[in-house]
Image (spheres, rainbow, N blue to C red):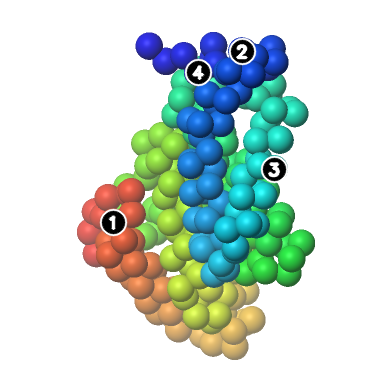
Amino acid sequence: MDNTTELITRCLSGNKEAWDEFVDDYSRWIYHCILRTAHGYGRRISTEDTDELSQDVFVILLDKGLKQFRGESKPYLLSYIRRIAICHTINYLKKCNRYVGLDDIRLENGSYSQLIKDMELTHPPNELEKLDTLDQLKDMLTQLSADERSIVEMSYFDQLSPKEIAEKLRITVDTYYVRKNRVLSKLKIYAVNRQISSTARGGV
């Protein structure tokens, strides 16, 4: 039986043993999320900084994070903690001028689903897998050239029309579609090679 709710209740009541158990259960998960987020944006952070960020996440959770959690099972708690760890790490990277890549918020909206669809990948069935796929997509987008990322940003996150994008790039609309499909094909190859959690359905 999942004792997540009970453990959180005990932690919030000030039970030291419960908090120690919580730290033991989730410290490696938080540490991994921090490193993975930094790596996804092309940055390496020291062990000392990673340890400090991990402690910060636990402070956030104890201060208000656990009070705001509304799930009842460990998978949902892992998903919730991951979001906090990712946001805190990104804020750290921005503050230290180490942030590179697409804005995190834009990847969380409907543009994410549309990109998955256009890559012809099956959409993840649940929130936990969606977050995992999202992380992998962010990582793959950092592997594209500046011009290729620009195509993705304008097409999916800035939501410009093909005509507007073609005008900005000073190319024809037909050329835009050729370049866009080429980038989608490249992303799909990355997805297959990295065994992204979504399942490939067919060619682009």
Give me the C-alpha separation between circle 4 and circle 2.
10 Å
Label 4 Cα crowd, 10 Å radius (few <14 / some 14-19 / many 20+): some
Q: Nearer the viewer, mark 4 or mark 3?
A: 3
Q: Residue at x 71, y 35 (%)?
A: 59
- Disc 4 residue type? Thr
Q: Is residue 199 left or right of residue 124?
A: left
Q: Which circle's residue, 1 or 4, is located before the other in the chain? A: 4
Q: Is residue 115 visible?
A: no
Across and down, in percent, residue 110 comes to: 54, 48
> Which of the pair 93/15 is nearer the observer?
15
> Which of the pair 28/76 is nearer the observer?
28
Give me the C-alpha separation between circle 1 and circle 2.
39 Å
- Disc 2 residue type? Arg
Q: Are marks 3 and 2 in contact (CB under 8 Å)?
A: no
Q: Which circle's residue, 1 or 2, is located before the other in the chain? A: 2
Q: Is residue 165 visible?
A: yes
Q: Which circle's residue, 4 or 2, is located before the other in the chain? A: 4
Give me the C-alpha separation between circle 3 and circle 2.
20 Å
Which quarter of the figure has residue 66? top right
- Disc 1 residue type? Gln
Q: Are marks 1 and 4 in contact (CB under 8 Å)?
A: no
Q: Nearer the viewer, mark 4 or mark 2?
A: 2
Q: Residue at x 23, y 59 (%)?
A: 202
Q: Compared to 163, does 202 lie above or below?
A: above
The residue where tag 1 is placed is 195
The residue where tag 2 is placed is 10
Q: Are marks 3 and 1 in contact (CB under 8 Å)?
A: no
The residue where tag 3 is placed is 56
Label 3 Cα crowd, 10 Å radius (few <14 / some 14-19 / many 20+): some
Across and down, in percent, residue 170 comes to: 59, 88
